[in-house]
Amino acid sequence: MDGKKILVVYYSRTGASRKVAEEVAKQLSCEMKEIKSTPSYPLGILGFQKALFHTLFAKDIKISIDQSDFKKYDLVIVGGPAWGGLPAIPVRKFLEVYKKDLKEVAFLMTQGGESGREKFFAKMREACGRSSRAQLALSKKDFEKGDIKKQVSTFINQLNLKAKDVGFKQKPESFASL
Ligand SMILES: Cc1cc2nc3c(=O)[nH]c(=O)nc-3n(C[C@H](O)[C@H](O)[C@H](O)COP(=O)(O)O)c2cc1C
């Protein structure tokens, strides 16, 4: 393949970030990998508290992901939830551990509300020492409206890729001008 090699990496505790990651990977016809963390952050109040505490205090957790060679990707799209206004600790850890291997990045975030996005993305950029090619933030309201496809396709437009960079058999609408 002569186009860009793209990977979507995500962490999700309750499934929202997974949905966005899936839609991005679908629209780009690219691979997707999940970040797993030790400890885990189970559903329920104890998992919530642990998630918040570990994120606010930048706890040194372990992560695992079914891929170790990130250098082979031209663009890695990294996504996950806001916890306490910050990137969830497994996402932050991923960016810190693999920053040397990431050529270019773009970010996805999901959140309950709609505030604090600039701070969230600034922390993502700080964790990997890179500027991002594009950023997409989705709130609970966006999910309730039921159509995240349009927002994902706007995000993909902002990536400014050439049609040959992605594995479509046919150009989708967002690439009509290329
Ligand atoms: C520990 C914790 C802290 C959270 N803090 C925030 C927050 O500061 N701002 C916000 O808008 N949403 C916050 N949320 C809501 C999540 O960001 C939101 O539900 C997100 O979409 C969950 O993504 P996931 O389903 O991929 O895990 C928090 C959720 C948890 C579990």
Image (cartoon, rainbow, N blue to C red):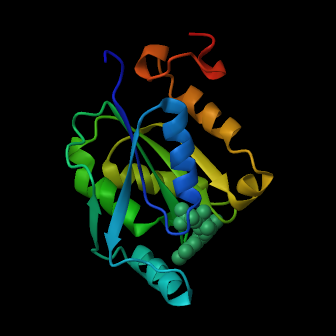
As drawn, which residue projects farthest toward the bottom?
46
Numbered-mark total: 0
The residue positioned 73% from the left and 52% from the top of the image is 142
> Measured from the top left, where is residue 21 in percent x and y?
51, 48
* Quadrant in which the N terminus is drawn: top left
Q: Nearer the viewer, residue 111 or 66?
A: 66
Report ligand 1 position as a quadrant: bottom right
As drawn, which residue projects farthest toward the front?
169
| Residue 90 sits above or below residue 119 on the image | below
As drawn, which residue projects farthest toward the top?
178
> Measured from the top left, where is residue 131 in percent x and y?
40, 39
The residue positioned 31% from the left and 57% from the top of the image is 94
| Residue 92 sits above or below residue 152 on the image | below
The residue positioned 49% from the left and 31% from the top of the image is 28
> Measured from the top left, where is residue 162 in percent x and y?
47, 16
| Residue 78 sits above or below residue 162 on the image | below
Asked whether residue 62 is in view, the answer is yes
> Measured from the top left, where is residue 39 in percent x and y?
33, 79
Left or right of residue 88, residue 113 in this image: right
* Quadrant in which the C terminus is drawn: top right
Left or right of residue 130, residue 17 in this image: right
Asked whether residue 134 is in view, the answer is no
Q: Quadrant of the rendered structure where residue 59 is?
A: bottom left
